[in-house]
Amino acid sequence: MKHKEADVLIIGGGIAGLMAAEYLSSHKNVIVITKFSAEKSNSFLAQGGISAAIDEEDSWAEHFLDTLKAGRHHNDQEAVKQLVKEGESVVRTLTEWGVNFDRHENGSFILGKEGGHNRNRIVHAGGDQTGKKVIEALIRRVSKNVKIVTHQYAVDLIIQDHKCIGVSCKDDENQTTIFQAKNTILAGGGYAGIYGTTSNAFGSDGSVLCMAYRAGVELSDLEFVQFHPTLLSDRVPAGLITEAVRGQGGILINSSGVPFMKDVHPLKDLAPRDIVSRRLFQEIHEHGEKVFLDISSIKDFRSKFPGVTMLCVNAGIDLDKGLIPVSPGAHFTMGGIVTDQSGKTSLRGLYAVGECANTGVHGANRLASNSLLEGAVFAKKVANSILSSEITDMKPATFKRKKNLEHKSIQIDGLLQESEIHLLMDKYAGIVRSKKELMSAAKTLNLPSWRPDLIKEPLPVIKRFNMQTIAWLTVTSCLKREESRGSHYRKDFPSQKKEWDSKKIIRSLWHDESIIAEKTAAGIFN
């Protein structure tokens, strides 16, 4: 067993993890660990840009209102203010760090428009390759002072005296390494990869959320999973057709050539993603139509969207016909590890940032191109919190910790295969949900315990256990929210309810395991 030490350990090599590493590297010894190479993060794959109120006619206040509207006012307003006020600063910092954003001949930024935005405020790099350009620049900069250890799958947090002191990992050869640190930052992304139809191509199994959950750290808002309207249909893995295509004039039409968004929302094809995705779902599953993105009106499409062009060419789609077949799929997860606005979790020494965190900025549905912005803004806040000795610990968890909870062995026969979880989530916890379907899924996903001694298991078993854990947590959270709000739509509760305003569903292992134990004793679970 290997052992490595650092002042700060960062789990995840996307924009949040790498920017936090850069801010800390001048003062701390930092190690970044990733499941794959850093070039395979979701940040690297991001086609969309970074939203920022840069235009003279725009303002952070307008960006703030658009974010709240998209999030159905489930957002933490103070966190949103911090997010949108930093947009211009983030673009300036990344420019100084070597990101060449797209500009007009006069040097001003080319600002695009995406779903839910009432103004053009999206900054891109390389057309539809913003994530790639940002991550490449960050890797060049960070690798000078930070050790990046690839192909390490974080298994469980190491806790001593109620404080996180590191993490145990396994590599592709099933070898264990203990990483010990004074502070640990979780930046490992979300859990949209538990769905079969998803834009998340690499390892988005919610593993860092599961680690936190097993340690008694609180999670929240897991029912809010954003489905992107325009994934390349009938492809595995499904490629993403960036929303910027619709921002340039792309129109959603059905098999008969009818544009079907014009009477649905004032922003038509650029309505918030939850609205567009549900309308596509209806067109495909209720009307039996195929859906296409009509790009015939977009001039110089190939030069504006080189990434999408390559994706379509590789899929055998003739762009000269002007139609790209699309369908919605899981894209981004608003739920995550509960943090304060400095990234602190309910466990001392543990921080979370990026998609795995739940700061409240996205509410019930993320506004387009706010994800890279979130990673950048809160990475700086986490770094500042660690560097400051004056900031006090976050308040303890709502649910009381059990002192001596024993690890239980995994019943491998009870674990589902990854493909089974994909099919189950697509069928029962997708864009449209109901109590009957969710209960069926919860029963299939349930296990006697969610806290086994994982480090003893082979890596494939660990991955399956994490996928089943976060799938069960997502499904049961969907069951608990008996309303429709943003990305969470219940056909048996189709309206948004006032009594659910600002109400969060908090998940804690201690609470969930005690409920399971009580129900098992009562014979409810067989």
Image (cartoon, helix red, strand yellow):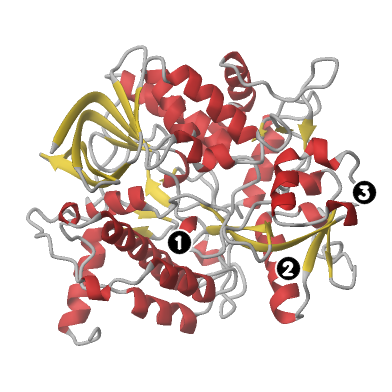
Which residue is outermost to the left? 404
> Residue under circle 2?
279
Q: Is residue 415 left or right of residue 451?
A: right
* Residue situated in front as seen by the camera: 80 or 512: 512
Q: Which mark is residue 297?
A: 3
Q: Circle 3: is it few (<14), some (14-19), or many (20+) Cα within 10 Å?
A: few
Rendered image quadrant of residue 194: bottom left
Tell me which numbered mark, 1 or 3, is placed earlier along the sequence. 1
Residue 78 visible in the snapshot:
no
Q: Amino acid at mark 3?
A: Ser
Q: Nearer the viewer, residue 173 or 42?
A: 173
Residue 377: where, in percent of width, then height?
Answer: 51, 29
Measured in 3D between alpha carbons, the distance from the residue under mark 2 to the one under mark 3, in whole angstroms, is 22 Å
- Amino acid type at circle 2 is Arg
| Marking on residue 458 | none
Q: Earlier in the sequence, mark 2 or mark 3?
A: 2
- In primary-sequence order, the first of circles 1 and 2 is 1
Q: In terms of image quadrants, where is residue 161?
A: top left
Foreground disc of the pair 1, 2: 1
- Spot occupied by residue 392 in the image (x, y as percentages of width and height): 27, 28
Query: In the drawing, does residue 63 fall left or right of residue 467?
Result: right
Q: Amino acid at mark 1?
A: Ile
Query: Looking at the picture, does residue 428 appear above or below residue 331?
Result: below
Residue found 24% across the figure and 75% down from its top: 413
- Foreground label between 2 and 3: 3
> Residue at point 54% right, 51% down?
363
Q: Tell me the residue at 31%/51% (across/down).
A: 218
Residue at image mark 1: 194
